Image (cartoon, helix red, strand yellow):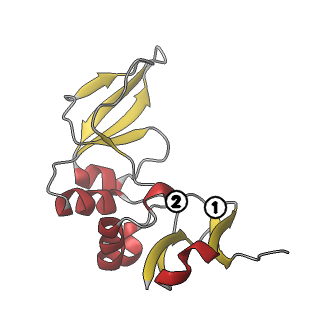
């Protein structure tokens, strides 16, 4: 059986800070957490935080996870490539490590905007299935072949 990750609530396919932390640990890398804020001059600045701060106040919009320590503060620029950035999204549905993270953490692997669940489908019919979503709520369907 092949395991696939689906988001089973309205929202986004998002992994929690705890999920990111465990993922990085499992692949043997250090992860840095950055939260963005606009200052009085409306300049976007990212500030490095520790995991407990990220968990306590899970970011909603302006944040990123990085394998590179960019220092305590980063002034955003459009040329900023965010070197070393880790993004766990729907492209990671079949990622063996992310599946392990969700199995270990359960609901704690999901962000405030998701409910990530693992579904199993037979290996030999993987091409016969498709993922559909309605406002982020994902469903796995068997493809209908029309002749």
Q: What percent of the width, then of the height, locates residue 118?
A: 46, 78
Viewer can see residue 23: yes
Question: Quick check: 128 left or right of 49?
Answer: right
Q: What percent of the width, then of the height, locates residue 9?
A: 60, 70
Which numbered tag is attached to residue 13? 2
Query: Which label's residue is closer to the chain start, 1 or 2?
Result: 2
* Residue 141 placement: quadrant: bottom right
| Label 1 residue SS | loop
Image vertical order of residue 35 relative to residue 76, above or below: below
Question: Quick check: 10 left or right of 145?
Answer: left
How busy is the neighbourhood of tag 2: few (under 14 within 10 Å), some, or many (20 plus)?
many
| Residue where numbered disc 1 is placed | 136
* The C terminus sits in image quarter: bottom right
Q: Residue at point 50% right, 82% down?
A: 124
| Label 2 residue SS | loop
Q: Residue at point 31% right, 57% down?
A: 20
Viewer can see residue 116: no
Q: What percent of the width, then of the height, locates residue 98?
A: 34, 66
């Amino acid at each position: 059986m092949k395991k696939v990750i689906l988001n089973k609530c309205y929202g986004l396919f998002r992994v929690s800070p705890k999920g990111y932390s465990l993922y990085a640990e499992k692949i043997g890398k250090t992860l840095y957490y950055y939260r963005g804020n606009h200052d009085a001059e409306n300049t976007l600045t990212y500030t490095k935080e520790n995991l407990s701060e990220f968990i306590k106040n899970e970011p909603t919009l302006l944040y990123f996870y990085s394998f590179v320590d960019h220092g305590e503060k980063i002034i955003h620029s459009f040329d900023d490539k965010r070197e070393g950035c880790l993004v766990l999204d729907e492209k990671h549905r079949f990622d063996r490590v992310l599946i392990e993270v969700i199995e270990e953490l359960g609901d704690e692997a999901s962000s405030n905007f998701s409910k990530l669940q693992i579904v199993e489908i037979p290996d030999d019919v993987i091409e016969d299935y498709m993922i559909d979503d309605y406002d982020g709520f994902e469903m796995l369907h068997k493809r209908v072949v029309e002749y």
